[in-house]
Amino acid sequence: MLRLQAATPATAQACDLNGLEKLPARTITTALPPALGLAGVQHWKGVPLRQLVEMLGGGEHSHIQLTALNDYSIRIPWSDLVRYDPIVAYSRNHQRMGIRDKGPLILIYPFDGHPQLQTQEYLNRTIWQVNAISVR
C-alpha cells in the first residue's frame, strides 16, 4: 500500500498497486548505475512522479519526499520532475516487483538518456521499496 500525503489531511489517501496501474503510465528503458545492483538494460513501467505530486495538489514550490519501507527518506526537487520526469515504477521487464527485487515501487530516472544522472546524488534519489509520498 502506498501512502499519498498532502499538506492537508483531507487530501491524504492510500493507493494500492491495482490503483496505480489504472493511472496513465509511462515506460523508461534504461540501465541503472552498477551501484544499484541491477545489471543490464531494464524496462520499467510506472506513473510519473510529477503526476502523483500534482494529484496531491503539489507544484513548483512543493516539498516532495519519498519514504521507503526501511524508513529511508529522500527529498526530490521539483526541477527533477520537470527535467527528467522520473517514474514511480511498479513493474520491471513486464513483471511486478517483490520486496526482494527492490519493489513493489522504485523511483526510476532515465539514466541512459542523461549522463549527468550518473552521480551519487541521483543514486541516492533512486529510492526503492517506496511506501509513502509526501507533498507539502
Image: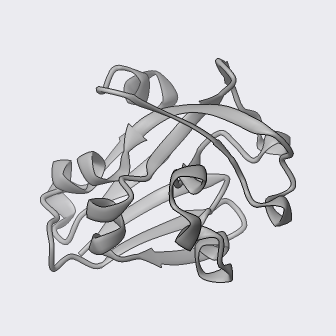
Front residue of 10 and 97: 97
Front residue of 70 and 89: 89
Front residue of 130 and 48: 48
Q: Residue at x 50, y 29 (%)?
A: 17
The x, y position of residue 23, in whole percent, is 30, 26
Q: Residue at x 61, y 63 (%)?
A: 126
Asked if residue 20 shows in the view, the reply is yes
Quadrant location of residue 99? top right
Q: Residue at x 25, y 46 (%)?
A: 51
Quadrant location of residue 135? bottom left
Q: Looking at the picture, does residue 122 appear above or below residue 57?
A: below
Total labels: the figure holds 0
The x, y position of residue 38, in whole percent, is 83, 47
In the rendered structure, the answer to whether residue 134 lies left or right of residue 40 reads left
The x, y position of residue 111, in whole percent, is 59, 56
| Quadrant where the image shows the C terminus | bottom left
Q: Residue at x 72, y 67 (%)?
A: 70
What colouring method underlies this structural image?
one colour
Front residue of 94 and 98: 94
Asked if residue 1 shows in the view, the reply is no
In the rendered structure, the answer to whether residue 11 lies left or right of residue 130 reads left
